[in-house]
Image (cartoon, grey):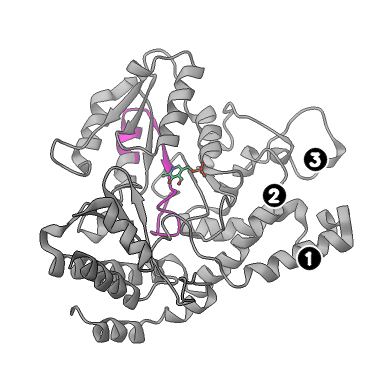
Amino acid sequence: MESSRSFAQSLDREDKLRVFRDQFFIPKDKNQKDVTYLCGNSLGLQPKSVRDLLEEELEDWKKLGVEGHARGKRPWRDYHEHFSQSIADLVGAKIEEVVAMNSLSVNLHLMMISFYRPAGKRRKIMIEAAAFPSDRYAAASQIRMHSGHIENDLVILKPRSQEDFIREEDILSKISELGDELALVLWPGVQYYTGQYFPMQKITDAAHRVGAKVGFDLAHATGNLPMQLHDWDVDFAAWCSYKYLNGGPGAVGGAYVHQKYFSQKLPRLEGWWGHRKDNRFTMPEAFEAIPTAEAWAISNPPIFSLTPLLASFEIFKEAGGMANLREKSIRLTRYCEFLIKENFGSQVNLLTPSDPEQRGCQLSLRVLGGKSVHQKLIEAGVICDWREPDVVRIAPVPLYNRFEDVYNFYEILKGIFK
Ligand SMILES: Cc1ncc(COP(=O)(O)O)c(C=O)c1O
């Protein structure tokens, strides 16, 4: 590999996925030049086809009114079903195990209502010390709802001292140490701060060995890495769709429930969209669950917050799915890592694991100069994000980022350090 623009451009020329960048709007800087957008870990870009799809829904509403539920181009009544196959493919699930609904934190709560059932001495939820705050609040509030005590029942695992990320062996040994006191492991697929990708199957196996349930927050994993939730026997998962899925700000998220739970009488918050479809509109008094993950859907789907996902999933499909994207992603992130390690020495400290098996596309960097460097990157047209206390996160996304974007980032950062 070489630290040169011509080398980066040669990698772009060989890239079979390069055509997909054209299907997205790239934000512009103040001179109307494309920015270097490395922030798909926070908000994915807008597919160009979104507007037409939204127009179609607006037209149906304009022309059909309520009739759009049954007679729309994509009838609104079952709108969320359009997403199930694409989601199932992305997370490695059966179509009946996934449902597009709500937002991530809401879905985590709905899942914990069903899967966090403290009883006897089995009461603890294990999370990581740097868990996304919303997950921590959600877990703590679930414990309080069951009259538990946060000090006892919320187990927080930290990396070893002087280390940035949690070792696999420490996660697995903590699970077995907690044993029959452990009710639930609530863990990220990819850690939002460090970009570490966790061994989800091993965590699941370890949790199941001690009789605990396991649920994953896949905010930073869905659309970033291929997964096999069903085969790994994961109990539940939830994610948002505004990051790697390009569904737009606040887009409808999703949830996965393993099919083995469909025949079990789990406690659940229920609403009419989880009720059998064939007699839902006869307004029966008693709830009868759809025997799929849709049983967890409560309300009818919000059409305009779902539509952008149709556009994005179409592009994922055209690009050949996660396997193709992952292959490019590994090369793109590795090139980014090469440029950083080769050129910046101690000015930039990489927090993300170097092993591609332990990360997705995101790299988290501790940069000399901290926030002021981030500010200068933004001013110079590199859109990346800052996470307190000291990390710049960059995510070269294989659907729309080029090797040249990664090179731009390096060159601008080099200028800032000068
Ligand atoms: C890892 C993680 N978990 C949870 C959330 C909260 O998501 P929401 O606001 O959609 O509930 C986010 C948001 O960025 C996140 O990154």
Mark 1 sits on what residue? Answer: 73
229 left or right of 97 in image? left
Write down the quadrant of residue 175 in the picture: top left
Task: Using the image, determine if residue 69 lies above or below residue 9.
Answer: above
For the residues marked 1 and 3, what is the alpha-carbon distance in whole angstroms? 22 Å
Q: Residue at x 24, y 36 (%)?
A: 172
For the residues marked 1 and 2, what is the alpha-carbon distance in whole angstroms? 16 Å
> Callout 3 environment at 10 Å: few (<14), some (14 to 19), or many (20+)?
some
78 left or right of 316 in image? right
- Chain part drawn in magenta: 204-229
Q: Nearer the viewer, mark 3 or mark 2?
A: 2
> Callout 2 environment at 10 Å: few (<14), some (14 to 19), or many (20+)?
some
Ligand 1 contact, mark 1 (Cβ < 8 Å): no
Q: Nearer the viewer, mark 1 or mark 2?
A: 2
Q: Earlier in the sequence, mark 1 or mark 2?
A: 1
Q: As rendered, which of 45 and 356 lies closer to the eye?
A: 45
* Residue 93 position within the rendered picture, expressed as x and y whole percent measured from the top left: 49, 52
* Mark 2: secondary structure: loop
* Residue 372 position within the rendered picture, expressed as x and y whole percent measured from the top left: 28, 54
* Mark 3: secondary structure: helix
Mark 3 sits on what residue? Answer: 280
The residue under label 3 is which amino acid type?
Arg
For the residues marked 3 and 2, what is the alpha-carbon distance in whole angstroms? 18 Å
Q: As rendered, which of 82 and 410 lies closer to the eye?
A: 410
Q: Residue at x 31, y 61 (%)?
A: 376
Tag 3–tag 2 contact (CB < 8 Å): no
* Residue 334 appears in the rendering: no
315 left or right of 336 in image? right
Mark 2 sits on what residue? Answer: 302
